[in-house]
Amino acid sequence: MGGEPLVSIMMPCFDAERTLPMALASLRAQTHENWEALVVDDGSSDRTWELLQAFGEPRLRLERFDRNRGRGAARQRCLEMAGGTLLSFLDADDWLFPEKLAQQVALMHEYPDLVVVSGAAIITDAAGQAVGLIPRGVAPGQGLATGFFSHPGPPPLSFPPCMVRMAGAREAGFNPEFRRSQDSDFLIRVMLGKRYAVSSVPVYAYSQAEAAGLDKTLEGYRFRLRSYGGYTESYPLSSRAEMAKTYARIGVYKLAGWLGAEQRLIEMRWQGITPEARAAYETAREAVTLAADTKEAS
């Protein structure tokens, strides 16, 4: 690990006993070995805390809330615990591709002006099958896209596959009051007025197909309204425009709910899986599963 930067991986957990073993195995499978994982059990009532303690990985730093405080508070506590120069993310129902950290550390080194890099995420269903792809921020056939984030609004990249420079992350922080949309609120503060990059390479397995729902979506939009409302003085036109768009989206989702079409609307967030992305997913899943099996056998 000599000379490799320390990457802090933020991992809030809540009642995650079913998916946690795969998430933890994906940490151990990383080809970039100089990492630490800041894991906050956000008041789980299942065996999450027991599994975390039993994992036996010295690079895990654990803390437990006495009650569920929400992802904003859990993420902020993870950030306070972090000691690395770069910050990455992992939810307890997702997992990382083995090359995720190594690829993004290389990009951060190659482009020192970037504050954030992101990649593509593979959408999975409840059975762990790849059902979609989020290559947000890159055009078809484009390997790497860079841009400048000029005004508050939906970040032009996916949060889960991100890597952020720690200095920017600490300056921005997470709002502990935000139980949803704390990720986009955080990214706006990190990225505003700065450069970012997005790679088309899949690096993250995301269980949105299982976790997404109408109530969670509407709650997320309500928190986004609060986020955009904080910029009405510094960015009066763009912030109010984004608030108007968000109100419109809330109306569309409510209508879809009344019509029983909300799931179809949610699934429109991602693209169909490509053969190349599916092959990359299967290769990564095999490596992570092997790491999980190796741990169980030891």
Image (cartoon, rainbow, N blue to C red):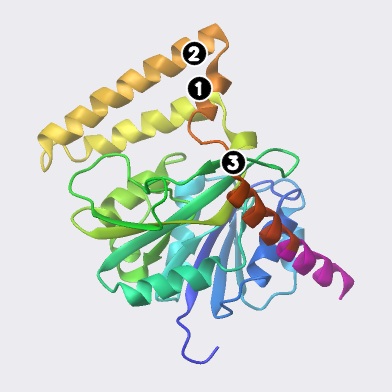
Q: Residue furthest bottom?
A: 2
Three-letter amino acid code at the position of disc 3: Ile
Percent x, y of residue 281: 65, 54
Q: Nearer the viewer, residue 292 or 284?
A: 284
Do residues under tags 2 and 1 come within 8 Å of each other at their CB atoms?
A: yes
Label 3 vs label 2, nearer the camera: 3
Q: Residue furthest right?
A: 297
Percent x, y of residue 229: 23, 34
Q: Circle 3 is placed at which residue position? A: 273
Q: Check disc 1 and report its element: helix, strand or loop.
A: helix
Q: Which mark is residue 197?
A: none
Give the quarter of the image for residue 21.
bottom right
> Above or below — where is 33 with respect to 141?
below
Sequence-first disc among 2 and 1:
2
Q: Main secondary structure of the magenta part?
A: helix
Q: Check disc 3 and report its element: helix, strand or loop.
A: loop
> Where is the C terminus found, in terms of image quarters?
bottom right
Q: Which mark is residue 265?
A: 1
Three-letter amino acid code at the position of disc 1: Leu
Three-letter amino acid code at the position of disc 2: Ala
Q: Circle 2 is placed at which residue position? A: 256
